[in-house]
Image: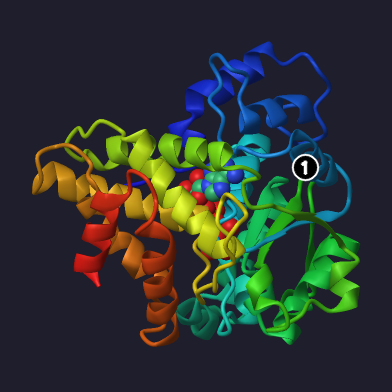
Amino acid sequence: MRPHAEHQYADELAALAAADDRPRPPGWRLSPQAVVTYLLGDGERISPKYVGPRRLVEVAVATLATDRALLLLGVPGTAKTWVSEHLAAAISGDSTLLVQGTAGTPEEAIRYGWNYARLLAEGPTVDALVAGPVMVAMRTGAIARVEELTRVPSDVQDALITILSEKTLPVPELGTEVQATRGFNVIATANDRDRGVNELSSALRRRFNTVVLPVPSSVEEEVGIVTRRVGELGRALELPEVPTAVEEIRRVVTVFRELRGGLTADGRTTLKTPTGSLSTAEAISVITNGMALAGHFGDGVLRAADVAAGIVGAVVKDPVSDAAVWREYLETVVRERDGWRDFYRAARAAL
Ligand SMILES: Nc1ncnc2c1ncn2[C@@H]1O[C@H](COP(=O)(O)OP(=O)(O)OP(=O)(O)O)[C@@H](O)[C@H]1O
Ligand SMILES: [Mg+2]
């Protein structure tokens, strides 16, 4: 359903590689310059994947060309996973060497495991060993990705320390080790809101350069991101054609930004903030759902009623406290706002 970045954007990557005459770090498919262009777009053939400060992307890419790993940090929905996938695709041509971090991630997921049938039959042999994504990346000189690193238990996180500092992965059962080929590095992501869950040990943190991905700086920028991604998702899901309604998108983004920041856009009214994160990513799914409703059940035009239920669902995560916050926002802000009458009615009905 969802092709990997290196397949979906194969044409762009090939065009960049063909025109790329700058030096490439060992094991890289593209020069650092070209990787940045791939991420930010060039206004012509190369579409922008990430919208945000150029410097930040440059720091991230430059880090990966050193012996330090990259940690992408940020609140939910700030494109950490998205950026990490595209960086791996552009640098190694492979974004699939992925460890999903959870509280239950075992050490084998980061190092290696065994094919138990063969282990029982043959004992520990090279053929019985099942390499994890990081080990594969070390062998092939590629980027490995670790998602939600701070959710991984600390003793399992520590397995990364030797890998990152010595660039080797010992396999004591075979009396050998795997040495990293040039081009190997690690991109980890971590959620700001998880801070403290399993804080990175200082030994591990020293092996990472941290880049914090910000929330979009302005309404315009966020509307731009949502519009682009909604268009791409709608095409990928083959939803019925619904003209992208910039006004409806602007409204969702405005509501999200005001509630997230606890202040109306004109700076006049302070607001209580709900418990949910109200991220750009959630704005994208509210609009995408609205387009599906409008296309399948409505008249093919995205209307307030199509997004209202989605917004309420995104805002009201806690049925008691968030519902009160939302009601207050509706009555004090939405109700009085010029041109928002339809949305006020639809949102009331959706409660
Ligand atoms: N600045 C941005 N530029 C481009 N796309 C963005 C931006 N911010 C968010 N998005 C979009 O938001 C969606 C979700 O992003 P992603 O899943 O990478 O967030 P995340 O930071 O990993 O969130 P989480 O902490 O929940 O894992 C993606 O489809 C991405 O395209
Ligand atoms: Mg993520």
Q: Position of residue 5 (x, y in %)?
A: 50, 39
Q: How many marks?
A: 1
Tell me what residue is drawn at x 37 percent, y 66 percent: 330
The answer to whether 1 appears left or right of 145 in the picture is left
Residue 120 as seen in the image, left or right of residue 93: left
Relative to the observer, which residue lies in front, 23 or 86? 86
What residue is shown at x 59% (from left), y 37% (from top)?
93
Q: Position of residue 50 (x, y in %)?
A: 60, 38
Q: Residue at x 22, y 59 (%)?
A: 345
Q: Secondary structure at mark 1?
A: helix
What amino acid is found at the position of numbered circle 1 in the picture? Answer: Leu
Q: Judge whether 225 appears above or below 342 on screen.
A: above
Q: Nearer the viewer, residue 10 or 270?
A: 270
Along the line of sight, the residue nearer the viewer: 331 or 81: 331
- Residue 314 at least partly seen: no
- Residue denoted by label 1: 56
Residue 240 falls in image quadrant: top left
Whether residue 165 sits left or right of residue 159 in the image: it is right
Q: Is residue 87 above or below residue 318?
A: above
Q: Quadrant of the C terminus?
A: bottom left
Question: Residue 212 is drawn in which quadrant?
Answer: bottom right
Q: Can residue 197 be seen from the camera position used here?
A: yes
Q: Quadrant of residue 30?
A: top right
* Residue 105: percent from left, percent from top: 58, 79
